[in-house]
Amino acid sequence: MLFHLQNQTISYDKKDILHSISFSIKIGEKVAVLGKSGSGKSTLLKYLFNLKTNSFAYVPQDLSLVENLSVFHNIYLARLDTYCTLYNIRNLIKPASKEINLMKNILNEFDLNTKLFSKIYNLSGGQKQRVALSRAIFKNKDILLADEPISSLDEYLSSKALAKLNETFKTIICSLHNVNLAINHFDRIIGLKNGKIIIDKKCSLLDKEDINNLYYVCE
């Protein structure tokens, strides 16, 4: 079992945000967390991340990119703790061909292969999100936690990005506000409303009433 919460109240900045939350998530599940802004999605993702920080690739809602660094260097930061100090210094000064080629292969999946050495501040919001997703893949973990990672992407790029993430990660917990994308790309949906779970169901078992409830949580 990856996570097991039982009647858990989760706070942020000394204020209770999620109330009596109960669910379990197993290794191998692809879970979408749906809800409108302020429903507690970000609080939940941060809480789960802090339980096992070193086990995941994590895409926070603010992306945590360094604006003055290039795409290459932002992505490379994901593996600083993997390589030795001398190798890291070498790549910060003069990127190795091995790392360049690996990143280009990842960025190509997100239509960003020409942006490798562009500064982050020169990119659009959607491009920055795709850089953050590329960094998560480069981190080379089996589990991804992602907080609204495709909110600035159109339908085509959103579907393409989610397909790549599903192909790459064994387990995904991802917050979204798009019901159709959640149903099409995940096996299970947890819907949050006013700090509570109002639906938790496998996508294959959703009926018309469930889908209406999912639209309700995103309103």
Image (cartoon, rainbow, N blue to C red):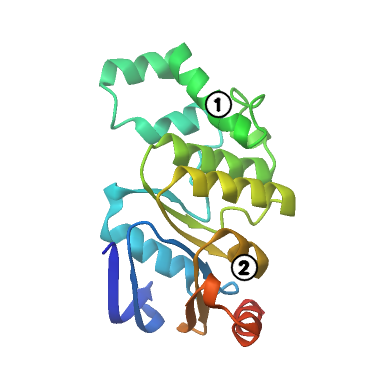
Percent position of residue 169, x then y = 43, 47
Percent position of residue 159, x then y = 66, 51
Amino acid bearing label 2 = His
The image quarter containing residue 82 is top left
| Residue drawn at point x = 28 percent, y = 72 percent | 4
- Left or right: 111 in relation to 141: right
- Give the position of the C terminus as an image quadrant: bottom right
Disc 1 target residue: 105
Q: Nearer the viewer, residue 76 or 162?
A: 162
| Residue drawn at point x = 68 percent, y = 53 percent | 152
Q: CA distance from mark 1 to mark 2?
A: 29 Å
- Left or right: 168 in relation to 104: left
Q: Nearer the viewer, residue 84 or 106?
A: 106
- Left or right: 21 in relation to 154: left
Residue at disc 2, secondary structure: loop
Q: Answer with mark 1 or mark 2, whichever residue precedes in sequence.
A: 1
Q: Is residue 149 above or below residue 181?
A: above
Amino acid bearing label 1 = Asn
Mark 1 vs mark 2, foreground winner is: 1
The numbered dot on residue 177 is 2
Percent position of residue 63, x then y = 52, 48
Q: Is residue 157 above or below residue 105?
A: below
Percent position of residue 19, x then y = 38, 85
Residue at disc 1, secondary structure: helix
Is residue 14 visible in the rendered image? The answer is no
